[in-house]
Image (cartoon, rainbow, N blue to C red):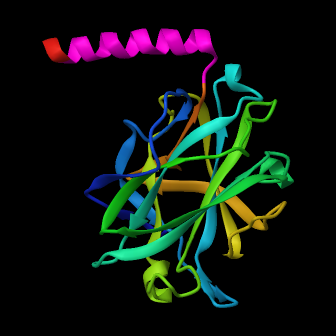
Amino acid sequence: MNRTKFILTLGVFAVGAASQATICFDNVTANFVGGGIAQGSSGVIGANTITRFFSQKLIVNPSFANKPVNRIQFSVANFNAVSVSARMRVRFHQTNGAGGGPGTLLVGFSFNPLTFGPGVTTVTGTLGAGLVIPANNELWAGLALDNNAGTTGATQAQLDNMGQGLFGNPPSVGTTQDNVFFSNAPGDFLSNNPAGTMGPITFNGANRALGWRLEAVPEPASMAVLGIGALALLRRRKKA
């Protein structure tokens, strides 16, 4: 891909309250490589201007098959010289599409618009019911950005310069592949079998992945273990 660019910042923006959870996939906590990709080629659908849809295949920890996900984290890259307000359209698909690409729609979420400064921002969103890890432990996680039918004020030229951050492979938790899915046209793809292609993103001479983190509510016994681990971590940091 020739739309990869350097970015020097990585911010964090929470959308919704944190809750006790267990990580079933994580590629954003420690793997940011300082770059991003503009999804570009945005278009107008009705009154809404929206980017293309880019998605990454996630293979989660096998113990989370059929478990509900309660929190997600992903990145938004802004290559404009000014802040831009955009709405995030997050979609999850099964891996039963053509060539193992995005197939049957699992669920979609539309987050309220946020204002993104230049650089890469990591967004955390708390979910309601709807996203459950498939039995095969695999799913595609994707994002498009729009101007919410013009209400955010983002222009088509500005949305052309919006996208996602790039992260290293392998992830901290789970596994993924170097190939990323790119839709052929702009749209939010709240539907089965989005049309597009798969290919690697190269940045600084290495293939990179898009960044995602999924958290699922643990069983009661696992929650107790998590609490002990968190306390131990706090103590180690205090001694350092």
Residue most extreme to the left: 240
13 or 27: nearer the eye?
Answer: 13
Where are the magenta residues, as a range? 218-237
Q: Is residue 28 above or below residue 93?
A: above
Is residue 91 in view from this perspective? yes
Residue 210 at x, y percent in the picture: 52, 50
* Front one among 13 and 34: 13
Rendered location of residue 15, percent (x, y): 45, 53
Magenta region includes residue 222: yes
Apparent side of residue 60 relative to residue 208 in the rendered image (left or right): right
Give how far across and how far down residue 52 sits, in percent. 62, 72
Vertical placement of residue 50 versus 156, above or below: above
Is 52 on the left-hand or right-hand side of 96? left
Residue name at image x 74 percent, y 38 percent: 132
Determine the main secondary structure of the stretch shown in magenta: helix
Q: Residue at x 36, y 47 (%)?
A: 33
Q: How many marks?
A: 0
**Residue at screen point 48% across, 38% down:** 27
* Residue visible at 14% across and 11% down in the picture: 239
Looking at the rendered image, the quarter that the C terminus falls into is top left
Q: Position of residue 170 (x, y in %)?
A: 51, 33
Q: Is residue 179 magenta?
A: no
Q: Is residue 96 left or right of residue 59?
A: right
Asked if one can make out residue 1 in the rendered structure from this viewpoint, the answer is no
